[in-house]
């Protein structure tokens, strides 16, 4: 195995912190091998720039694959040896020849409210403006508080926090895991319970992608892989694959391991405007987590009206 390795990542402050976490874990478990791991920031099509203004992915025709496309291309041609992703940004289907070889222990998957001068959603006055480009968050916010107004708000975590501080919106919704990794937990107003805001599929989980034929990288990553996270993420992503979800589709799922050895899976599909939300939950053996997710996805698909994903009002 090569002693000098290149780890690809997006270039945002949060992505760099996540890549350095993977790097430090690998160096710690392979200390005797004297590895050198270079973090390689790469620009992706999904990265926000000011000239993008506040266009949503729906308006710009993009999807979550824009956050991984260029990184995966670099991996395929050998410009990098492995890539770290926020698993919530990874499409349901990977490019041929690539695989997720390791999942780190999942951070807290909850979403949080970040707001000016209020502590929770209930304290926001009627007509208050929520900034988010996540249709999943938009749908659930409007289902819970249809009197609020949702507007697009893009940018990395620091950018969105600044926009709220500057009064561009009254509040926004962010992933708790991101704030924790950035050391910005003090900026949150409240953690949103899952009955109000079910998280994105795989939210809080970091995955390391490699070329499928790279056995050396697979062995290198094995010690930092978390089997419990694999079980839960496997169930959630199996559910998503059946529905073929994207950033244009409000889909949420959260799998959790239970003390009795089973895995519970809570799922949600919604119309963009929040006028209709369908939730389904099931439990089953942890060893069959992916089958559970697939079965629940198929059951959800049968239950949805045929126009559910094509009839949008936002």
Image (cartoon, rainbow, N blue to C red):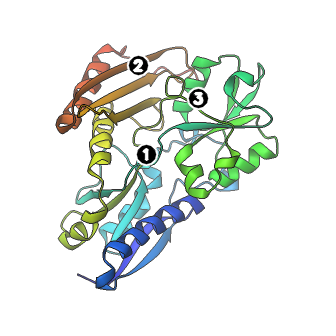
Q: Which mark is residue 138?
A: 3
Q: Which residue is mark 2?
A: 279
Residue 12: x, y in percent? 57, 61
What is the CA distance from the residue labelled 1 to the residue labelled 3? 17 Å
Q: Quadrant of residue 119?
A: top right
> Which residue shows up at 45% across the image and 43% down it?
203
* Front label number (3 vs 2): 2
Q: Which residue is mark 1?
A: 88
Q: Quadrant of residue 140?
A: top right
Residue 293: x, y in percent? 26, 31
Q: Secondary structure at mark 1?
A: helix
Badge 1 density bin: few <14, some 14–19, many ≥20, Cα 10 Å: some
Badge 2 density bin: few <14, some 14–19, many ≥20, Cα 10 Å: some
What is the CA distance from the residue labelled 3 to the residue labelled 2? 16 Å
> Which residue shows up at 31% across the image and 40% down it?
232
Q: Secondary structure at mark 2?
A: strand
Residue 171: x, y in percent? 72, 35
> Which residue shows up at 46% across the image and 52% down it?
66
Residue 22: x, y in percent? 41, 66
- Residue 156 relative to residue 231: left or right: right
The reply to whether discs 1 and 2 touch (Cβ–Cβ < 8 Å) is no
Which is nearer the N-term, disc 1 or disc 2? 1
Which is nearer the N-term, disc 3 or disc 2? 3
Name above or below for residue 208 compared with residue 277. Answer: below
């Amino acid at each position: 195995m090569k002693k000098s390795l290149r780890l690809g990542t997006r270039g945002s402050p949060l992505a760099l912190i996540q890549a350095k976490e993977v790097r430090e874990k690998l160096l710690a478990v392979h200390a005797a091998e004297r590895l050198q791991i270079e973090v390689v920031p790469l620009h992706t099509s999904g990265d926000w720039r000011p000239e993008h203004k506040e266009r949503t992915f729906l308006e710009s025709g993009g999807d979550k694959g824009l956050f991984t496309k260029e990184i995966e291309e670099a991996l395929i041609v050998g410009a990098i040896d492995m890539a770290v992703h926020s698993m919530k940004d990874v499409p349901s289907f990977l490019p041929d020849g690539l695989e997720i070889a390791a999942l780190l222990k999942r951070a807290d998957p909850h979403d949080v409210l970040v707001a000016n001068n209020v502590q929770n959603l209930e304290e926001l006055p009627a007509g208050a403006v929520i900034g988010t480009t996540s249709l999943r968050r938009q749908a659930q916010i409007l289902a819970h508080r249809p009197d609020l107004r949702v507007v697009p708000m893009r940018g990395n975590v620091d950018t969105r926090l600044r926009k709220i501080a500057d009064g561009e919106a009254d509040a926004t919704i962010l992933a708790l895991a991101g704030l924790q990794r950035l050391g910005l937990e003090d900026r949150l107003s409240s953690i949103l319970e899952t009955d109000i805001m079910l998280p994105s599929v795989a939210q809080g989980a970091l995955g390391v992608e490699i070329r499928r034929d790279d056995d050396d990288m697979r062995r290198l990553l094995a010690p930092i892989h978390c089997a419990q996270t694999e079980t839960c993420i496997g169930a959630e992503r199996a559910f998503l694959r059946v529905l073929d979800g994207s950033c244009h589709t409000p889909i949420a799922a959260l799998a959790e391991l239970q003390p009795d050895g089973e895995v519970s899976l809570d799922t949600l599909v919604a119309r963009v405007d929040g006028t209709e939300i369908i939730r389904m939950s099931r439990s089953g053996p942890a060893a069959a987590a992916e089958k559970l997710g697939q079965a629940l996805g198929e059951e959800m698909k049968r239950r949805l009206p045929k126009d559910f994903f094509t009839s949008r009002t936002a």
